[in-house]
Amino acid sequence: MTLASPSSVSLGMQAFTVLIVRGVQSTVDGLAPEVRQAVLAELFRIGADACREHSDGAPCFPYTLRLDVADCRMHVELDPMRTRLSLTGLTRPRPH
């Protein structure tokens, strides 16, 4: 196996790691399939956008996003320097 060093990888090929923190995973698992798919798709869209926005390698501090997706409130931490995106919170409205 050959590992590529950062200097041998083109800037456009950087990828983000998407993590769901352990305490949030059960909430994601309990979502209806179409809602879960929308939440996961949004996470990967954010990661892809962040890849493009931060591909120049300029230092950027971690930041938090709060999003409403498919009637769920998502809390996402984005760390461009470590190329990591974490879903740290997910709440959904209670059924009536």
Image (cartoon, rainbow, N blue to C red):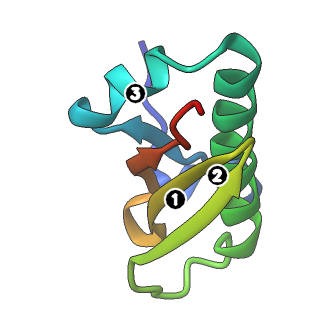
Q: Is residue 80 left or right of residue 49?
A: left
Relative horizontal placement of residue 93, taking residue 51 as reference (left or right): left
Position of 43 with respect to 20 (left or right) is right
Amino acid, disc 1: Ser
Q: What label sits on residue 33 in the rendered view? A: none
Q: Residue at x 74, y 41 (%)?
A: 70
Task: Tell me if residue 37 can be seen.
Answer: yes
Name the residue carrying label 3: 27
Dot 2 falls on a residue whose secondary structure is: helix
Tell me residue 38's x, y (percent): 75, 32
> If you read the primary sequence from the N terminus, does the residue marked by circle 3 or circle 1 appear first?
1
Q: Nearer the viewer, residue 7 or 62?
A: 62
Q: Which residue is mark 2?
A: 47
Say what secondary structure mark 3 lies in.
Answer: helix
| Label 1 sits on residue | 7
- Of tags 3 and 1, the one toward the viewer is 3
Which callout, 1 or 2, points at the residue further toward the start of the chain? 1
Give me the residue at 47% from left, 41% from top: 17
Label 3 Cα neighbours within 10 Å, binned few <14 / some 14-19 / many ≥20: some
First of labels 3, 2 by sequence position = 3
Residue at 47% x, 25% y: name it. 28
Q: Position of residue 90 (x, y in %)?
A: 45, 45
Please, is residue 53 above or below residue 35 in the view? below
In the image, farthest residue toward the front: 96
Q: Residue at x 76, y 65 (%)?
A: 52
Question: CB under 8 Å between callouts 3 and 2?
Answer: no
